[in-house]
Image (cartoon, helix red, strand yellow):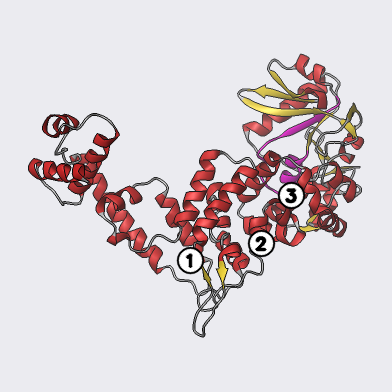
Amino acid sequence: MKTNVLLELPSTNRARRAVQIIEKLRAAGYVSYLAGGSVRDVLLARTPKDYDIATEAKPEDVERLFAETVPIGRQFGIVLVVERGHAYEVATFRGEEGYSDRRRPDTVFWTSPERDAARRDFTVNALFYDPLNRQVIDFVQGVVDLEAKLIRFVGDPNERVNEDPLRMLRAVRLKNSLGFQYDGPTYQAIAKHAALIRHISSERILTELDRMWGDPTRAASLAELAELGLLAEILPEIAALRGVPQPYMYHQEGDVFDHTVRALETLPKRAPTFMVWAVLFHDAGKSTTISYPKEPGERIRYDRHKTVGAEMARAAGVRISMARTEIETIAWLVDHHMDLKGLDTLREAKRRAYLLDPRFKWLLELHHADAAGTIPRDLSLYREVKTFYKKYLALWRTEQKVGPPAALLSGHDLRDELGVAEGPEMGKILAKIQEAQLEHQISNRTEALELARTLLKR
């Protein structure tokens, strides 16, 4: 179905070059359109991130017409056309049959635009746009669903899910990022087949979750993953928080899962995904460490929940193929999220190491999300520590300009004066002397040598 729509593409270089690619394909005799999410976004008055093109030209035709191409999925008819440093995905209209690995079709064949639309995931992603004749080409009632704000699988929803179960996660993300609702059969198919997500590789799941966490609607998506049964399959540690009680005096927002959702809602729109993961797991340990009151007046406790939660975060990160550095950052944040009290009581060397750790600013933001996601809300400790942190950084930067205090002893001094051989023991003694100097326990060479002698005796 062709619909005349007064549709203006954004006046950007990317949009103009996409149209120029279509013009070149048309001039060579190939039917070509803008396709998929870019059409959806323009119809919703959003600026597309990318402009994908669908054409009847075969991959070899595209490679012949354009000077710079990359065959990223030639067997599926997908070629990147590079124009002035920007890549555009150009795909041949194709049909697909069989999904034995629940990801890739067993058979791919070149076909018509109508058949191509029929193999796509959601109706709102199966639209084409002819920018030369200003026509929307809609074979699946995608325009109707856009107007009704519905996410609906193309064709039989059960078939679409069985072909690639990752589409269930995409449905959740797309529905919330667009502010739409599910079509009834679409919702039912996801809830029915949630367990099929187990067949999807951890890498693909992680990629989709990171895209979901990168959207400001991440909290709503988390709640729906739980409601649909998907969360129990991919992050059972977080699903287990549903129904875990909290002491009402401190947490009137509901159970631990309710608290986690509220904490996510308080994160900045552009929060890095590792922070979202840290918020997700900050109380994960409560499901296994909960102890109920034994005497009147006692409250529910979760001893060691932060340490247990950090281990859960590590295990989950490995399971879903997260990068090792990201896993350790998340686990560190979870393990320290209760440690902001008493910073002023720490020894100077330890306090300095803690506050100058590049992860500390994120630890502060994790505490903010934790406190802001609680009813009653109490941000007093957050404000106190943030003020202290800013002052400390300013003082440290001043010290850096002046330069750190000169070392009272060197390795040569320890060797010549006390006979200490080079090696780990010498390094430990020098570190202890520096720590004592920073804490103003010693201030001259004589005192440093005396401390070194004491350490050697120990």
Decide which of tag 2 and tag 1 comes sooner along the chain. Answer: 2
Image position of 413 (left or right of 28): left
Q: Nearer the viewer, residue 264 or 326?
A: 326
For numbered disc 3, what is the local secondary structure? helix
From the top left corner, tell me how far across and down residue 47 is, in percent. Answer: 66, 43
Q: Residue at x 65, y 23 (%)?
A: 83
Q: CA distance from mark 3 to mark 1?
A: 29 Å
Q: Which quadrant: the N terminus?
A: top right
Q: Residue at x 69, y 48 (%)?
A: 45
Does 38 lie within the magenta span?
A: yes
For numbered disc 1, what is the local secondary structure? helix
Residue 325: mark? none
**With respect to residue 316, does 106 lie above or below?**
above
Does 374 lie within the magenta span?
A: no
Q: Please, what is the three-letter code of the amino acid marked with disc 2?
A: Ala
Q: Please, what is the three-letter code of the amino acid marked with disc 3?
A: Leu
Q: Nearer the viewer, residue 399 or 42?
A: 399
**With respect to residue 118, does 419 lie above or below?**
above
Decide which of tag 3 and tag 2 comes sooner along the chain. Answer: 3
Q: CA distance from mark 3 to mark 2?
A: 19 Å
From the top left corner, tell me how far across and down residue 187 is, in percent. Answer: 82, 58
Q: Nearer the viewer, mark 3 or mark 2?
A: 2
From the top left corner, tell me how far across and down residue 391 is, in percent. Answer: 28, 55
Return the residue found at the far bottom: 296
Q: Nearer the viewer, residue 395 or 216?
A: 395
The residue that disc 1 covers is: 371
Q: Please, what is the three-letter code of the amino acid marked with disc 1?
A: Ala
Q: CA distance from mark 2 to mark 1?
A: 21 Å
- Magenta part of the chain: 36-56
Q: Mark 2 packing: few (<14 Cα in 10 Å), some, or many (20+)?
A: some
Residue 205 appears in the picture as rendered:
yes
The residue that disc 3 covers is: 169
